[in-house]
Amino acid sequence: MQERHDAPLAPLTTFRLGGPASRLITATTDAEVIAAVREADDTGTPLLLIGGGSNLVIGDKGFPGTALVIATKGFTLDGTRLELAAGEVWTDADDLEDANGLSGPIKYAETARALGVDPGDRVPLPAARETVLKLRSGKGMVLDPEDHDTWSAGSFFTNPILTNADFAAFHARVKEHLGPDAEPPAYPAGEGRTKTSAAWLIDKAGFTKGYGTGPARISTKHTLALTNRGDATTEDLLALAREVVAGVRETFGITLVNEPVTVGVTL
């Protein structure tokens, strides 16, 4: 187990943002993880668990407590059951390529088209994995240290789910702002509820790909990703996020909600 004090957290996140932790522990075994959590509980110390750091927005002041990096490794494959340690990177589990079973039913039309199958069909796991990675890479959703479009948390906002009444009001505002023939994305989300697209809302509210002039901007590949262009601060990112939230609310009457976990900051 490695321990450091006043340790920077930005390199541990895909945003490359955030101040230092008072104490940073890197645990490589389950026993070390358990010991660190118990110590924090016993002493009343604030505890922040960090895995791949792909869903974290940490404030510029950092974290006044113990940050615990879970770096446990190892995996086992028993027939069709694959078990990985919490700190394992899925793509590093080489026997994933040898698990030649079928995927679950393909849910998304875009993925089905890329695979040349119909939605609901099943395909060999390696083919499904390769196709999904290729599609996500094209949207900047696979981390590449050389590509600032991937210095993000992936999708920054969740897709809103609206009641029938709220969706009707939203639908009216869409036609008011975009014209009588405009139709927003709409997907069933349970009885009396409809889901719409956050990416569509952001784009139609005027925040197009590449929007922004500062060090934090919307991705040039996908409007749902907010990115660090290299020298941004967390406050730069939050200022952009707040601008997008305010613009979508003013245009469509919908308040977007952030998907990443925020630490020491709020929208």
Image: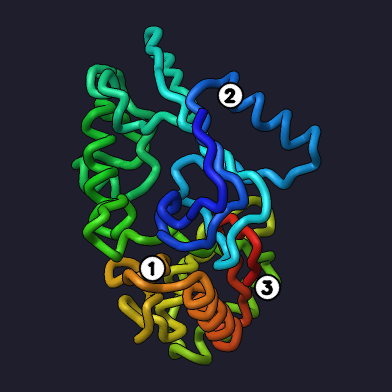
- 82 in relation to 56, above or below: above
- 73 in relation to 21, above or below: above
In the image, farthest residue toward the top: 78
The quarter in which the C terminus is drawn is bottom right
Q: Are marks 2 and 1 in contact (CB under 8 Å)?
A: no
Q: Are marks 1 and 3 in contact (CB under 8 Å)?
A: no
Residue 148 sits in which quadrant?
bottom left
- 125 in relation to 196, above or below: above
**Residue under pointer 2:** 32
Q: Nearer the viewer, residue 220 or 148?
A: 148
- 245 in relation to 176, above or below: above
Dot 1 or dot 3, earlier in sequence = 3
**Residue under pointer 1:** 227
- How far is mark 1 from mark 3, CA to CA? 30 Å
Q: Residues within 10 Å of mark 2 (few under 14, many from 20)?
A: some
Instruction: Name the amino acid, label 1.
Output: Thr
**Where residue 257 appears, x then y in whole percent?**
60, 66
Dot 2 or dot 3, earlier in sequence = 2
Q: Residues within 10 Å of mark 3 (few under 14, many from 20)?
A: some
**Where residue 96 appears, x then y in whole percent?**
29, 23
**Residue under pointer 3:** 166
Q: Residues within 10 Å of mark 1 (few under 14, many from 20)?
A: many
Q: Residue at x 35, y 61 (%)?
A: 151
Left or right of residue 40, residue 123 in this image: left
Q: Residue at x 37, y 33 (%)?
A: 89
Instruction: Name the amino acid, label 2.
Output: Glu
Instruction: Name the amino acid, label 3.
Output: Asp
**Where residue 172 appears, x then y in whole percent?**
58, 84
Q: Residue at x 51, y 70 (%)?
A: 234
